Image: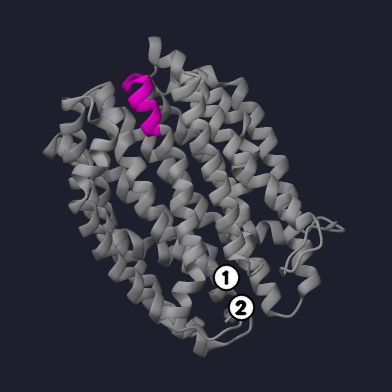
Amino acid sequence: MTLSLSSHFTYRRLLRFTLPTMVMMVFMSLYSIVDGVFVSNFVGKTALAAVNLIFPVCMALCTLGFMVGTGGSAVVARTLGEGKDELAQKYFSLLIYLTLAVGLVLGGLGVLFTPQIARALGAEGQLLADTIRYGRILFAGQAAFMLQSAFQCFFVAAEKPGLSLKVNLAAGLTNMVLDAVFIAGFQWGLAGAAAATVLGMLVGSVIPLLYFARKNDSLLRLRRPGRFYGRIVAQTCLNGSSEMVSNLSTALVNILYNFQFMKLVGEDGVAAYGVIMYVNFVFVGTFLGFALGSAPLVSYHYGAENRAELHNLFSMSLRLMAGAGVLLALVAEGAAVLLVSIFTSYDPALYALTLRGFRLYSLAFLCMGLNLWGSSFFTALNNGLISAAIAFLRVLVFQVAAVLLLPLALDLDGVWLAVAAAEVPALVVTAAFLAANRKKYGY
C-alpha cells in the first residue's frame, strides 16, 4: 500500500513512512564515521584531531541548508495541504536556488579564510597544517553539502522518502569506497579523506537536482519561481530557525568542547571527543530521522485542519520517541567497548579515555530524542519561535552552562556529562511548550 501525506497513520504506517528518513540520516552520519575510522587508523590521531577541529565549522555553515530544508518543507507541505500545488512548486524552486547561491558564497569564503579559522581554533604546528589541508577541500564542497541537507527534507514533502534514502545511500557508498581508495590505497591522507567526503556530497546533491529539474512523478518539480517570494523566504527562515539554531549551536558547543579538552588533556581529548561524536551521529540520526520524516505529515494535516489526525500523530510520536530514548541508551552502553575499539584500539590510553567518556555521554540519549522531536514538531506547525526557543535553550543555554560549570566540580567527567545534564531541563521546557499549546493546535 502506497502511503501519502493525507493517509491515516497507525504505528506501523508511521514507522514505515519515516523509516527511509531514519535510515538515510543514520547512513549520512557514516560520512564522518568512515572518515574517522580511516583517518584514525591510517593517518594518526593528530590528523583525527584536525578533522574534529574544522568539521564543526563546516557543519555550522551547513545549518543554513538544513534550515531551508526543514523550514521550507513545512511551508511547502502546508501549501500542498491547502490544495495550492503550483504555488508550492514555485516556493520549493526558489528555496533550492537560494540555497545553491548562498552555499557557493560561503564555500568560497571558507576556502579563503581556512588558515585564520584553524588558528582561531587553537591549532599549531602539524595540527595547523593538517587542519588547513582538510578544511580547504571540505569548504570547496560547501554548496553541495547544503543542497544535500535541504533535499533530504523536500524529498519527504514530495512523498518520496524512499528515493531520498536511495540517493543518500549512493552518496554514502561513494564516500566509503573512495575513503578506502584514497586513504588506504593511494595514501593521500587527509586530502584523500576530504576529497572522498566532497565527492559523496556531490552525488547527494546533483542527483536530486537532476531529478527535480525533469518531469517526475513526485509532488514537486523545479521550475522558474516567477518572482522572489520574500515573505516565504522569511517564513522559511523563521520555521527552520530552530533546526538551524540547534545545529549551529551544536557546532559552536563542539568547538567549546574542543577548547575544554585542549585545556584539560590536550590533543588526545579532542581525538576522543571526535570519536564519541562519530558514534553519537548514528544515535542522533535515528531521532532526527524520525522527526524529519514525520514533520511533513504534521504540516499537511495542520494545513488541512485535520485535528483528529494531528492528535493521532502527536500521541504516537511522543510514545515512540520516549521508548526509543531508553532503548538507544541501553544499546549505547552495551555496545560501548565494540564501538570505541573500532577507532582507538591502536592506542590504549586513547581507548580508555574514549570509553569512559562515551559511557557517561550516552546517558544523554534518554531525553535527547524527545527534545529533538519536540522542536521539530513546532517547526512542522509553522511555529518557528517556539521551536527556536527549545533549540536555543537546549544547546546555547543549558549545554554551554553545563560544559563550563560541571568541569569545575567533576573535572574531565564534567565535560563528558554536560550534554546529559543539559537534556534534563531542556525536556522540562519542551514538555511545558507542548502542554501550553495543545488546545491551540488541537493535537
Q: Is residue 362 above or below residue 309?
A: above
Circles 2, 1 touching at the beta carbon (< 8 Å): no
Q: Is residue 332 left or right of residue 48?
A: left
Q: Which residue in the rendered view is the most extreme toward the left?
A: 409
Q: Amino acid at mark 1?
A: Pro
| Residue underneath mark 2 | 4
Q: Quadrant of the N terminus?
A: bottom right
Q: Residue at x 46, y 33 (%)?
A: 55
Nearest the camera: 209 or 346? Answer: 346
Query: In the image, which disc is placed on residue 13?
Result: none
| Farthest-out residue, top | 125
Q: Nearer the viewer, mark 2 or mark 1?
A: 2
- Give the image's coloring scheme: one colour
Going by the numbered disc 2, the residue's amino acid type is: Ser
The answer to whether 203 appears left or right of 212 in the picture is left
Q: Residues within 10 Å of mark 1 (few under 14, many from 20)?
A: many
Q: Is residue 41 magenta?
A: yes
Magenta segment: does it hold 436?
A: no
Q: Residue at x 56, y 28 (%)?
A: 195
Image coords of residue 218 (percent x, y): 71, 68
Q: Which residues are magenta?
A: 36-46
Q: Secondary structure at mark 2?
A: loop
Q: CA distance from mark 2 to mark 1?
A: 10 Å
Q: Nearer the viewer, residue 73 or 278?
A: 278
**Which residue in the structure is indicated by mark 1?**
296
Residue visible at 50% across and 90% down in the picture:
308
Q: Residue at x 68, y 40 (%)?
A: 102
Q: Position of residue 161 (x, y in %)?
A: 58, 64
Of residues 3 and 103, which is closer to you in this image? 3
Q: Residue furthest bottom?
A: 308
Categorize mark 2 by other alpha carbons within 10 Å: few (<14), some (14-19), many (20+): some
